[in-house]
Amino acid sequence: MTTPPIRARRILETCIYAEDLEAAREFYTRVLGLEVHAEQKSRHIFFRVGEGMFLVFKPSATRAGMTVPVPLGSHGCTGEGHVAFAAEEDELEIWRARLAELDVKIESEVDWPQGGKSIYFRDPAGNSVELATPRLWGLE
């Protein structure tokens, strides 16, 4: 018997890593206006973003695995990660002003050849954070 074709429909959650969770919490709530959905101070913070979740894990705490309420495998990484949040093109100027007001240095801005625009900056853990118009991926 052959399994019928199936594919993932959307990203439900994505994760980056930061040792200093308090700095991550402050950054993502203050700079991007994200709402904390849940947190375990020594292990992780979960933020709601639209219909999905953005997770920040402390890698040294998650490498040993965890039980919530069932055992999960260990995970974690080292080094800088990347996350992109959707922004409308007419919001980009407001985002530039907000980042400047909060002393968040913009590393680069890109007008993509296929359409779309991106603004790149760093979180306190060194992760690359991007505000991008969905047109970058041919999405409206």
Image: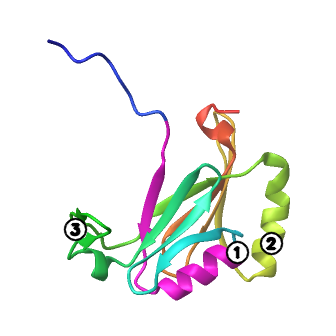
**Disc 1 residue type (three-letter):** Val
Q: Which picture quadrant has residue 79?
A: bottom left
Mark earlier in primary sequence (1, 2):
1
Q: Which mark is drawn over residue 31?
A: 1
Tags 1 and 2 touching, CB below 8 Å: yes
| Rendering coords of residue 123 (x, y %) | 56, 76
For the residues carrying marks 3 and 2, which lies nearer the camera in this image?
Answer: 3
Residue 83 versus residue 39: which sits nearer the camera?
Answer: 39
Q: Is residue 112 above or below residue 14?
A: above
Which structural element holds mark 1?
Answer: loop
Q: Which mark is drawn over residue 98?
A: 2
Q: Is residue 102 above or below residue 90?
A: below
State the residue at coordinates (49%, 77%). 39
Name the residue that disc number 3 marks: 74
Q: Which picture quadrant has residue 42?
A: bottom left
| Rendering coords of residue 102 (x, y %) | 76, 81
Q: Which residues are magenta?
A: 10-30
11 in the magenta segment: yes
**Disc 2 residue type (three-letter):** Arg
